[in-house]
Amino acid sequence: SAIRCKDPVLVLEHVDLYTSTWPAPTEDFDYFIEIGKASIRRPGEEITVLSYLSMVNECLTAVESLGNIDAEVIDLRWLDRASVDWETIGESLRKTNNVLIVEQGALGTGYGAWLSDEIQRRFFDYLDQPVQRVTGGIASPSISKVLERAAIARSEEVISKLREICG
């Protein structure tokens, strides 16, 4: 995708993805992810869950473990403001009327703050409640596993917030 883009590209590699394996094209070696297109990783009707990078799998794990919440999980994929897939997000929000943004970063400094604000501006009339967020804690991730866990959100936080929102 970066090769096909006419603009400068920044590739974010998340350390949690280094040991992950995913299906890859085995015959179509020209396969690429469409620039500016989000991916609906799990269809649903009750709430839209927006996330990116390693938190997408945390969201999928949380939703599957709950079983009784019909969440649509969307992998944003493209995080620059010009490439956000507002069409996919809007279509989902008009269907679910609820949104949860999930990210590892801290509440005040995360990408979700901007995304939440923009969703409120664009889709306010479709929302049944304010945009909800799951974020990491106000701690610095470090070498210590205890401090890292305090700083970074995981599926447990997603489960808790989904229960709070959807009952």
Image: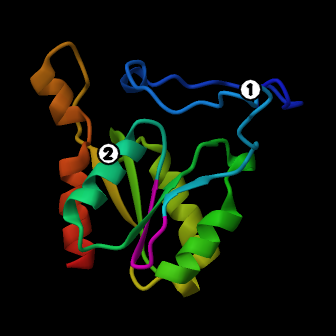
Residue found farthest to the top: 143
Q: Nearer the viewer, residue 23 or 59?
A: 23
Apparent side of residue 71 relative to residue 41 in the rendered image (left or right): left
Asked if the stretch drawn in magenta spans residue 24, the answer is no
Give how far across and how far down residue 80 sits, in percent.
67, 42
| Discs 1/2, front | 2
Name the image quarter holding the N terminus. top right
**Quadrant in which the C terminus is drawn:** bottom left
The residue indicated by pointer 2 is: 58
Residue 122 drawn above or below residue 134: below
How far across and down, in percent of the image, does residue 86 sit?
68, 63
Residue furthest out toward the right? 6
CA–CA distance in space, label 1 to label 2: 26 Å
Instruction: Please provide percent x and percent y for residue 117.
Output: 53, 63
Q: Is 105 placed left or right of 163 in the picture? A: right
Q: Nearer the viewer, residue 137 or 58?
A: 58
Residue kind at label 1, given as amino acid type:
Val
The magenta segment: 43-50
Task: Report the disc number at residue 9.
Answer: 1
**Disc 1 packing (10 Å; few <14; some 14–19; many ≥20):** few
Type of amino acid under label 2 = Glu
Residue for point 26% across, 42% down: 153
Q: Secondary structure at mark 2?
A: helix
Q: Residue at x 44, y 78 (%)?
A: 45
User: Picture quarter containing residue 46?
Assistant: bottom left
**Helix, strand or loop status at disc 1:** loop
N-terminal of the pair, mark 1 or mark 2, is 1
**Magenta residue check for 44:** yes
Above/below status of 74 relative to 47: above
Question: Residue visible at 20% across and 70% down?
Answer: 163
